[in-house]
Each structure stands twice: as structure tokens, then as C-alpha cells.
């Protein structure tokens, strides 16, 4: 085969192989633990497509919904008997080791932007920062307003003991009876001075 045919065909084959290698990831929503950018951990925002990083946990249901403005909102709903006390056993975001290390021993603010969800709307949302075996903030309960609103609390994250722990942000509706839901627009973590 002459070189003028072989090299262009080989180049085209290499490009095809590269495209086929990256094609499964094109258009996929982010998943896995929430990680920082490696530079600035003073404010971590989980919103838009990154809300897909939620882990439903237990029997609760989570669904990433498209909004009319081409954004995303996270729907979380559960029945009264489906939620466990531990944050990691219900709807939660797992924090990557870089955030755990940066927030260890630090005072932080956890903010959730949420609103009631449709017909089975919850009247309250609860949020918990869990640092695994070394401690947790406990469930902080907020009364939901009709539209999207910000709900915040401050917490001093315990110092990690031993190897890196597993930190979580639990977010879920308060479910006194039946099934209740909440829509989450964003979760914001801020390191305070």
C-alpha cells in the first residue's frame, strides 16, 4: 500500500478510535463524590447538573428534573417509614477526601436552596452534615416557604481522626405521614473565618 494512502487511513483510524473511546462520556451527567477544584475551598456550590451526584440511600427516591430555563432541580421524596436517622442511609451527597481534609476542624456554613415539591409537598426540609464516626451536626429542620428560599446553619466540623473519614450532606423532607417531597435548587458549603 502506498504511503500516501496508508498514513491518511491510519490517521483517520486513530481519530475514530479516540472518538469511540470518549463517546460514552459525552453528555453524561456528573456522578460520584462532590469534589473541590483543588484551589479554593472557601465556597463549594452543588447546583445544576452536579445535583445528579446525590445518592438516594434507603428507600427514598431522587430524580434530577429539567427546568424550563434548561437548568436542573433535584426532587427528593420519601415515605414516613423509609428514612433512617443516619445521613448516609437517606438522600445525601458524599464529599470527596479533598473537601473532608479542607473542612476538618473548620467552622462552615451549610446552605440549601429548596422549595416544596408539587402535590406531595413537604412543609419542612431537614439538613445534616455528617463527619462519619467523629460527629455530625444533627438534623436541622427548616420550615419551607412557598417559593425557593435559602436555609442555612453553621457547624464546626470535628477534626478527622486516623485516616480520612467519610463526610456527607444529608438533605430530605420531613415526613410525618404518607409521602412528602422537596425540590432542591442548590447546596452550598462555605468555610467561615
Image (cartoon, rainbow, N blue to C red):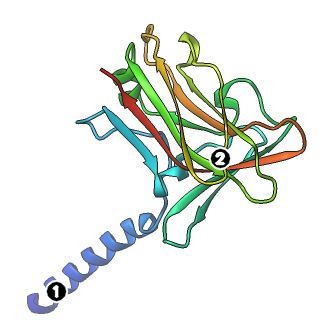
The residue lying at 76 percent from left, 36 percent from top is 174
Which is more toward the observer, 129 or 1?
129
> As drawn, is 115 to the left or to the right of 188?
right
How far across and down, in percent of the image, does residue 147 sit? 61, 54
SS at badge 1: helix
Horizontal side of 53 relative to 75 (left or right) equals left
**Tag shown at residue 155:** none
Residue 16's place in the image compared with 156, above or below, is below
Name which quarter of the figure residue 80 lies in: top right
- Write down the quadrant of residue 85 in the picture: top right
Select label 1 or label 2 by which is in front: 2
Instruction: Judge whether 46 appears above or below 66 on screen.
Output: above
Count residues near mark 2 (Cα–Cα under 10 Å), then give few for <14, some for 14-19, many for 20+: few
Q: Secondary structure at mark 2?
A: loop
Residue at the spot 85% in from the left edge and 35% down from the top edge: 176
**Marks 1/2: CA–CA distance:** 63 Å
What residue is at 36 percent from the left and 21 percent from the top?
101
Relative placement, left or right, of 19 versus 10 is right
Among the two numbered marks 1 and 2 on one chain, the one whose residue lies closer to the N terminus: 1
Coordinates of residue 74 in the picture (x, y in percent): 60, 53
Image location (x, y in percent) of residue 17: 33, 72
Decide which of 62, 145 is in the foreground and name it: 145
Quarter of the image for residue 59 reads top right
113 versus 96 height, above or below: below
- Badge 1: residue crowd in 10 Å (few <14, some 14–19, many ≥20): few
Q: x, y (%) of residue 184? A: 59, 49
Labels 1 and 2 touching (C-beta < 8 A): no
Label placed on residue 145? 2
Q: Which residue is mark 1?
A: 8
User: Which residue is at the far top?
Assistant: 161
Amino acid at each position: 500500500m502506498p504511503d500516501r494512502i496508508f498514513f491518511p487511513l491510519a490517521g483517520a483510524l486513530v481519530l475514530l478510535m479516540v472518538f469511540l473511546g470518549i463517546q460514552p462520556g459525552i453528555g453524561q451527567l456528573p456522578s460520584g463524590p462532590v469534589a473541590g477544584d483543588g484551589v479554593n475551598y472557601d465556597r463549594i456550590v452543588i447546583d445544576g447538573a452536579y445535583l445528579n451526584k446525590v445518592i438516594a440511600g434507603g428507600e427514598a427516591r431522587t430524580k434530577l428534573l429539567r427546568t424550563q430555563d434548561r437548568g436542573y432541580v433535584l426532587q427528593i421524596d420519601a415515605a414516613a417509614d423509609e428514612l433512617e436517622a443516619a445521613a448516609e442511609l437517606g438522600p445525601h451527597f458524599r464529599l470527596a477526601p479533598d473537601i473532608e481534609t479542607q473542612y476538618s476542624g473548620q467552622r462552615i456554613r451549610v446552605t440549601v436552596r429548596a422549595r416544596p415539591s408539587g402535590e406531595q409537598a413537604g412543609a419542612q426540609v431537614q439538613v445534616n452534615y455528617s463527619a462519619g464516626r467523629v460527629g455530625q451536626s444533627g438534623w436541622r429542620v427548616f420550615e419551607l416557604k412557598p417559593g425557593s428560599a435559602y436555609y442555612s446553619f453553621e457547624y464546626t466540623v470535628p477534626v478527622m481522626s486516623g485516616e480520612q473519614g467519610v463526610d456527607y450532606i444529608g438533605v430530605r423532607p420531613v415526613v410525618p405521614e404518607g409521602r412528602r417531597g422537596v425540590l432542591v435548587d442548590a447546596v452550598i458549603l462555605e468555610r467561615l473565618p
